[in-house]
Amino acid sequence: MANKIHDAFENVKADPALTQSTIRYLEQKRSRQMRFVHLPVYKTLAAVCAMVAILIGVGGYTWMLTPVSYVSIDINPSMELALNRMDRVVSVTSYNRQGAELIRDLRLKGKTYKQAIYMITESGRLQEYLQSEEELVLTLAADSSRTELKTGVEECCSHIGHGSRSVSVDVNVASEAHDNGLSVGKYSAYLQLAQYDDSITIDNCRDMSMAQIHSQILEHEHGSGHGHGSDSQNEQDTQPQAEQQEPEHDTQSQDTQSQDMQSDDTEPQGHRHGRLQGHHGSHE
């Protein structure tokens, strides 16, 4: 029986075309299966890469826009530059009407702090204040390690001239200043003046120019703020002494008068003694 079946199929041959098509079918099926197996892996990897790129982009954007230091420019107009870690301007804030007018037409964002400072100080509006011999103060609020930034601000002052000067304060002063509605420069000047005069208020300093605040500070440092009081006290101390000296002169006058009276009394006694001797002589 087995031989008969074998003999029946022995002459059956597969068509070459069918064989090739079958082979192609099996290869295509295997390829589809492989793609199906690896597709989730590829999609996952692509998603992870995209997420990393987004995070890097968002983080970099945030890093670029986060202020870490501040430079205020105060004269009578008061304005402030917020700088990122690359010392570029990320925002500009004015703290009075004059400051707002001065920076209104200036494009300062993205500039280096030196470029921004020069654009402000070389503008026609600010030059008017400098020509009137107002004091310009650049105040840097930054971490103490930012020595290059401090040196750069000092160089800006040397370039500007016109009696400008630079001040450096701790970066924490910036948040206190902003909470009180002042630039770091104006607030720093207020803190210095308040050490000498506890009656001064933030509102007082807000309406004062830097020259006015500095003038009061110098008066206290040189003692002028207390000089009038000392002079008055000296005058009061001197007055009683003068009044006390007058009785001494009166006493001396009285002593002199007493001596004169004694002289007058002595002189008659002498004459009287002479007359007595003369009387006795004549009697003898």
Image: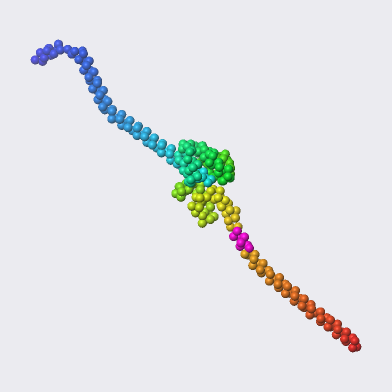
Highlighted range, magenta: 228-235
Q: Nearer the viewer, residue 181 or 87?
A: 181
- The picture places residue 4, in percent across and down from the top left corner, at 10, 13
- Tally of marks: 0
Q: Residue at x 50, y 41 (%)?
A: 102
Q: Residue at x 37, y 33 (%)?
A: 53
Given residues 283 and 209, the one toward you in this image is 209
Which quadrant of the figure has residue 21?
top left
Assess whether residue 64 is covered by the magenta stretch: no
Q: Is residue 158 left or right of residue 247?
A: left
Q: Position of residue 279 (x, y in %)?
A: 87, 86
Task: Give whichever of 75, 229 is nearer the camera.
Answer: 75
> Residue extending furthest left?
1
Side of 238 relative to 135 (left or right): right
Q: Position of residue 182 (x, y in %)?
A: 48, 48
The answer to whether any part of residue 95 appears in the image is yes
Q: Examine the residues drawn in magenta and state their main secondary structure.
A: helix
Q: Is residue 139 left or right of residue 16?
A: right
The quadrant of the picture occupied by the C terminus is bottom right
Residue closest to the far bottom = 283
Q: Residue at x 58, y 57 (%)?
A: 226
Q: Vertically, is 26 above or below 117?
A: above
The N terminus is located in which quarter? top left
Q: Is residue 37 left or right of residue 218?
A: left
Residue at the image point whose x is 35% and y is 32% from the top: 49
